[in-house]
Image: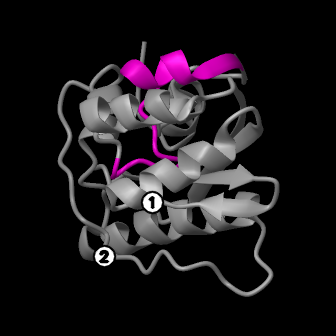
Amino acid sequence: MLASTSAYRAALLRRLLDTFTQAAPGTDEDALPGESPHARAARLAEAKARAVAALHAGSVVIGSDQVADLNGTVLDKPGTVTEAHRQLEASSGNEVVFHTAVCVIDAQGNAHAHVDETRVVFRTLAHDDIVRYVERERPLDCAGSFKCEGLGITLFERIRNEDPTALVGLPLIATSRLLRAAGLTLP
């Protein structure tokens, strides 16, 4: 079971599992005082998984969360075109670290977790580049205001990470390892 209504995460999970259900965890995603982006992603992934597991006893539940970090400033989902422009202008020519956490709650209620760190260096973006990109891609529901599985890839100079799927929102290498640890049989 996927503790998320994200179409992006569901599409990724279909690469590992033929069938699963999705449920909205209804988790408060606000940061705690003094919480690092890494810790926030890990906490929220587990909180989402536990919230859904509490309603579906005996199920294996996957929770995930992603936090974008620009020099210590968290770039949440922008929600508006104006905020997307502001985030991309701030990211232009800079490195943004994406902390993508996954937590699998097994049928006994044990947590198996991992946080993947992806470092993205944005190329220097002209104002017109940002306007065209946001208008065409509408990345208003994505941390950091871009979709790397779409045109967002054109905004970067380079990406460094362990798992290319992490940047989309669910690190499949870690997820497959955690699902096996939770007792599921995968290829």
Label 2: how many Cα within 10 Å (few below 14, some 14–19, many 20+): few
Task: Indicate whether 60 appears above or below 185.
Answer: below
Quarter of the C terminus within the rendering: top left
Real-space Cα distance between discs 2 and 1?
24 Å
Task: Indicate whether 57 appears above or below 82.
Answer: below
Q: Secondary structure at mark 2?
A: loop
Q: Is residue 98 visible?
A: no
Residue in view at x 50 percent, y 71 percent? 47
**What's the coloring here?**
one colour
Circle on res. 127 = none
Q: Nearer the viewer, residue 40 or 131?
A: 131
Q: Amino acid at mark 2?
A: Gly
Which residue has dot 2 on it?
Answer: 26
Q: Secondary structure at mark 1?
A: helix
Q: Position of residue 131 (x, y in %)?
A: 39, 37
Residue in view at x 57 percent, y 24 percent? 173
Residue 23, picture quadrant: bottom left
Q: From which residue to which does the magenta span run?
A: 140-158
Q: Is residue 83 visible?
A: yes
Which residue has dot 1 on it?
Answer: 83
Q: Nearer the viewer, residue 57 or 55?
A: 55
